Image: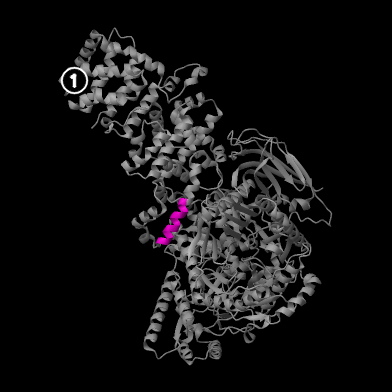
Amino acid sequence: MTSELDIFVGNTTLIDEDVYRLWLDGYSVSDAVALRVRSGILEQTGATAAVLQSDTMDHYRTFHMLERLLHAPPKLLHQLIFQIPPSRQALLIERYYAFDEAFVREVLGKKLSKGTKKDLDDISTKTGITLKSCRRQFDNFKRVFKVVEEMRGSLVDNIQQHFLLSDRLARDYAAIVFFANNRFETGKKKLQYLSFGDFAFCAELMIQNWTLGAIGEAPTDPDSQVDDMDVDLDKEFLQDLKELKVLVADKDLLDLHKSLVCTALRGKLSVFSEMEANFKNLSRGLVNVAAKLTHNKDVRDLFVDLVEKFVEPCRSDHWPLNDVRLFLNQYSASVHSLDGFRHPTLWDRYMGTLRGCLLRLYHD
Amino acid sequence: MPGKLKVKIVAGRHLPVMDRASDLTDAFVEVKFGNTTFKTDVYLKSLNPQWNSEWFKFEVDDEDLQDEPLQITVLDHDTYSANDAIGKVYIDIDPLLYSEAATVISGWFPIYDTIHGIRGEINVVVKVDLFNDLNRFRQSSCGVKFFCTTSIPKCYRAVIIHGFVEELVVNEDPEYQWIDRIRTPRASNEARQRLISLMSGELQRKIGLKVLEMRGNAVVGYLQCFDLEGESGLVVRAIGTACTLDKLSSPAAFLPACNSPSKEMKESPLVHPPSHGCRSTHNSPIHTATGSRLTQNFSVSVPTLIYTGMGSGSAGKEGGPFKALLRQQTQSALEQRGGSPHRFCRRREFPFFTLTAFPPGFLVHVGGVVSARSVKLLDRIHNPDEPETRDAWWAEIRQEIKSHAKALGCHAVVGYSESTSICEEVCILSASGTAAVLNPRFLQDGTMEGCLEQRLEENLPAGCGFCHIPYDELNMPFPAHLTYCCNCRKQKVPDVLFTTIDLPTDAIVIGKGCLIQARLCRLKKKAQAEANATAISNLLPFMEYEVHTQLMNKLKLKGMNALFGLRIQITVGENMLMGLASATGVYLAALPTPGGIQIAGKTPNDGSYEQHISHMQKKINDTIAKNKELYEINPPEIAEEIIGSPIPEPRQRSRLLRSQSESSDEVMELDLSHGKKDAFVLEIDDTDAMEDVHSLLTDVPPPSGFYSCNTEIMPGINNWTSEIQMFTSVRVIRLSSLNLTNQALNKNFNDLCENLLKSLYFKLRSMIPCCLCHVNFTVSLPEDELIQVTVTAVAITFDKNQALQTTKPHVEKSLQRASTDNEELLQFPLELCSDSLPSHPFPPAKEHLESASSNSGIPAAQRATSVDYSSFADRCSSWIELIKLKAQTIRRGSIKTTVTVEKASPMGEGNFRNRSAPPCANSTVGVVKMTPLSFIPGAKITKYLGIINMFFIRETTSLREEGGVSGFLHAFIAEVFAMVRAHVAALGGNAVVSYIMKQCVFMENPNKNQAQCLINVSGDAVIFVRESELEVVSAQQPTANCQPLCTGGEVTT
């Protein structure tokens, strides 16, 4: 006796969250059944393995049919075939677009092209995430990227509108899209200590302040907003950053800056002497990073540079985080008191974001 | 020209890409009704076309309005080649033809293609202007309402129940026409869908005419079926119960009719005494009625038989009728041609009712199940306009049913249904029902008052009257074991009662009920034509007998004494017959406590054998004890003593019978030792019997927290919460063709059904505590070694805590209610007083339900909805709403504005969201509930919008690509649900009640990578309102002015 056909169709589509997770994690039906058996479900419910097998198959089939709709979540809301309560729809979408930290760290900042897809095998081996799941996550990144890449307006809003994600997840995707578009290097060994959250935090700051979308808030003629996009850095701004070079190139200015900072922080830092000794190096590092951002290649290395030029020197001197904060605040603020410096707005736009990023990046 | 049909095509969405080059579609729409076709403009390059067409107007006869479906075809325009069809929508406009139903059909319909399934949706608006037509020779029957519901629909009252209506129409099946060889599968499928749609329209119109002739205005319990007879044609037949219904005025509908259970309940006890009593039973001996007139048939009828402890007694005589078969055939051929003599006198001839639940007072006594089957050889239907042959076949079977009912002292048959099973050219026709004595006042032109009198005269005790035997005790139609009714102690009742109806509302039940199934397979030699028919006919009596034996055994094993909703299905295949009987077992307080099951061996001297026997006996006894506990069956012991002793006579009789039928003295001994309880003896004389006993013990009870039944509601559970889940599950197994024996076959079949049930319990575990109601199994044998089982049922949650409450508070409540009601309804003073008393001890379900919902209804409902979504999910849903809103506004306004609005004030956004809640609802798909029951727990049905009767064919030539047979059928059934929901929503409804999947014919050819499936579903589209919302309304309504009587059938239900 073999079962040729075995289906269950509810008027309200049954969604089993546990099975959904197994499916998302890329397990085959038999692996999923084995995992479910191990979870002790048979004992709890008194079911047999055959029942479990049939149930798992059924759910997998349903998910497979839903997958097409999940690729364009608004379709899931408007389709008539599966009657699913809104809360369940949201859950399906949210979980489908959720990703693994380990996976996203591998592809963050990489070009989301087919070439990279071939690397999925390696990523799968490295992270222990099934190839199927890697592929789903990668395809999700790529799909979201494709849809919002050329779109105007707020990146997060665009993502939410087209993929109906929660605010949190939409922000994460905004970061992924932003990183992919600007190809920031995140895979270097010295960056391994950083989590996706760290990068996402920086991405958000940069989107808010350094992109074309950022100046969109300024009162400009709506027609001129052709480039109101969150995904690209504001080229003009990057060009302008060269002007900051004067801060380190002009020796007087640099000395003055240093003395202003040192005066203000004397007695407040536990690492005051180290700071004093390193000031010029640190300042040069930060300003040079800014000046170099005109080149695409240097943009990509932004995080490598920040870590090399600032995070690592401070860390080797064992600066407490609070001292870093005090220093950066003072360092940014003091520039306003430099008489010869003519770009305070530019400086704030740059340093405001960078300060946030550095504080986030500064940990073990 | 009595009608004008107006159609407007608004828009399409999610259309498939038809032009690979542009990834777009140039869609237009053809709207066809009868022979008239209109077209919209082509909407270029869009997957979401906005046609916004003018109103297309069709001026048509109302006859056509009833017969023809509106056919909407979406096509892709192609300049150089033929336009490609995207798909079609058939809309049955019947609901627009009677005044109280829907006034407009408007909404998104899935565009369906028989090869590709659903491909996008189309928004259509349909209206009908009807002109009055006084022509009395008219052929249409517009205005007659149809209900699938097998009880008087809520919000109506029955003025008169006229009785049985039936009709059938036949045609050639397009699939078998010569043209089918040259046309595409799509064209063939569409021809079939259209033809069936046309035929059901015609059938409904004809039935409507009959109803008008009878001066009725509605058909209740309308059941329409298709017989795909293959080469010999296509038969569409329908039966129903003609009624004159009155719509309850709207306050009435809100209040008394639907809202106050206590009223109904108090009434019901008076008249119909359904509860525990019971009478007879059945079993199977078979009495063969030889159809002497039309011969080809051989009918085997199984009247109710009594099964008092006859053990494996002898089956009745069978056999005789077949010998004459051949001779008869020639004869019959002649006779058929001559036309059937029945045809004229038939109309009111059959006192049959397709209802399974009745207004109070309608049902007086129940005799037992009557059934008849007949095996026919199909021949080609030569002239579709003269369906006499098929008519005559059914007439004959009905005649037989009628005479069986008479033999039981009953003048009517209720819970009546008909079915067929076809394999190649052999067809088994079956009919079954419950013989009953009805209150005559209802059937004549009497009004409610009339029947009131009647009730008073009869003065039947509440809750048990229906169990009292309708036949003469001294002249019983079959040997029965009678005792005095355990409830009233005045009338005689049988020891077991089998019925095809739902448990009457006022029946007094002890404990809970459960689903009981008998399953059976019998191998048969492959044969042709007559030889095949003969073989089948010879097997039928044995199958009937065994099915009954199994049912009886299982019933005893559960410690119960009555079956409701009994449905026995015999399916014929190439090389086997399958029998599946499902029913809901209960313990009726009026019937005597069932005796145990006693096992007897044939070889008493063998020590080890005896040990084995006693071991089995112990197991059985344990099981019975366990079941009694499980189903909470604790009948008052005293009652038995009292009843038992004063009537020694019945027992003697049964003993006498037994000694006649059994040759073994030993059995007698055992039996006697069992005392007055009259144990049921199973004799183990061969391996078969052994198997039987084993199989008895293999049925696993549902896991805790689960109950199941095949009736509308579960006896003993009455605090339903509002969560329902209707589902269809299909399984097909392939038997290994080697060494098939009856035992192996039985085991396979048994496992199949048991595993299916287990899977259901597992899948629905999140709903615990819950009950599977209206569990409907259908078996078919699509090919030699394939068995297909289809189950449709609904899982309903209930509140366990409330269930645990003692009945006392309820009784008090019901008393209170009853008394307040009494005051309101002075017209029926007598009735009220008399019944409030007897009904207390076990107030019927309704009361519980009502009190549950009125007292704590709101919280319960809330709990139910919130329970299964985690808070995470909740958050998600609010995101979704929010996002949707944003999306809407963004689309509407310029980007700039929205962004600023949003950023500017979160408050503003919040407000906005609240304000726009309704539009938001538009953008999502409205929820449509589906249920095989006639009601929706925790809600009141406020309007019936019309009948839904849909037929779909789906075919694929890329089976593997669609996920194999499972993927294919899964998607198809989901699509069928979607199309039903869309039609209901377009009618303005939010639920389908009395939903039934009447046919699910699945054929596959994996070698060719092909499969085909036909599905036929029906139900009643309704609008319901949650009780919690209703309460607000009803509080404002003046108190009831409606007549309680009319609300009857409803609860029951």
Is B395 above or below relative to A292? Answer: below
Q: Is A57 part of what is drawn in magenta?
A: yes
| Callout 1: chain | A
Please say whether residue B339 is visible from this viewpoint.
no
Numbered disc 1: secondary structure: helix
Please say whether residue B662 is visible from this viewpoint.
yes
Residue B326 picture location, percent across and down: 72, 78
Q: Main secondary structure of the magenta part?
A: helix
Magenta region, residue range: A49-60
Q: Residue reaching furthest bottom?
A: B665
The C terminus of chain A, quarter of image: top left
Residue B955 picture location, percent across and down: 60, 53
Hey, which quadrant is residue B920 in on the image? top right
Residue that badge 1 annotates: A275
Q: Is A188 part of what is drawn in magenta?
A: no
Residue A18 picture location, percent across and down: 40, 50
* Residue type at tag 1: Met
Work out whether residue B74 or residue B463 is closer to the camera in this orientation and state it: B74
Work out whether residue A107 or residue B690 is closer to the camera in this orientation and state it: A107
Residue B3 picture location, percent across and down: 78, 47
Is B450 above or below relative to A91? Answer: below
